[in-house]
């Protein structure tokens, strides 16, 4: 298992089981989302380096502080179309299918 501490480390780890530490987002950014039968709960997750990703879980997360999540890193892709041009841009986001999570009562970086 790979521990990821920065968003820039996601590239090259798609499809692998990874561990990430962060917090459930209080401010939600706009993201691509998908529906995954096996992981029906969706949360926005802030990484400590200022990035936010979408995570999918099998059950509801009830942590108030830092969380350690372990799961499979996926790449969600879409096409973005500018209605004023004929250019279609490829767009993707890294997201996580969470296998397990653990709350931290008090976490020190």
Image (spheres, grey):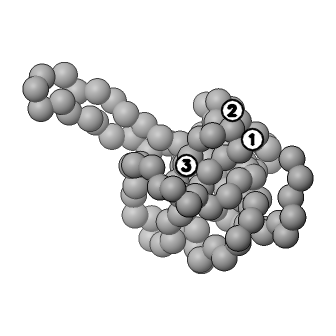
Residue 76 visible, this orientation: yes
**Element assignment for label 2:** helix
Q: Which residue is mark 1?
A: 4
Residue 70 visible, this orientation: no
Percent of width and height locating residue 42? 50, 65
**Element assignment for label 3:** strand
Question: Comparing marks 2 and 3, which lies closer to the viewer?
Answer: 3
Q: Residue at x 74, y 65 (%)?
A: 65
Q: Residue at x 44, y 45 (%)?
A: 76
Q: Which residue is mark 3?
A: 53
Q: CA distance from mark 3 to mark 1?
A: 13 Å
Position above or below: 70 against 6? below
- Local packing at callout 1 (Cα closer than 10 Å; few below 14, some 14-19, many 20+) is some
Query: Which label's residue is closer to the chain start, 2 or 3?
Result: 2
Query: Which label's residue is closer to the chain start, 3 or 1?
Result: 1
Q: Residue furthest front?
A: 27
Q: Is residue 89 left or right of residue 86?
A: right
- Local packing at callout 2 (Cα closer than 10 Å; few below 14, some 14-19, many 20+) is few
Percent of width and height locating residue 37? 45, 70
Q: Residue at x 45, y 49 (%)?
A: 29
The answer to whether mark 2 and mark 1 are in CB contact below 8 A is: yes
**Element assignment for label 1:** strand
């Amino acid at each position: 298992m790979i521990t990821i501490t920065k968003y820039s480390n996601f590239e090259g780890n798609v499809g692998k089981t990874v561990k990430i530490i962060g917090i459930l987002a209080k401010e939600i950014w706009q993201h691509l989302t998908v529906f995954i039968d096996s992981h029906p709960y969706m949360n926005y997750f802030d990484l400590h380096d200022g990035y936010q990703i979408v995570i999918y879980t099998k059950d509801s997360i009830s942590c108030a502080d830092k969380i350690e999540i372990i799961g499979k890193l996926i790449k969600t892709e879409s096409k973005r179309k500018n209605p004023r041009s004929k250019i279609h841009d490829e767009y993707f986001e890294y997201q996580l299918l969470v296998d397990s999570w653990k709350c931290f009562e008090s976490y020190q970086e």
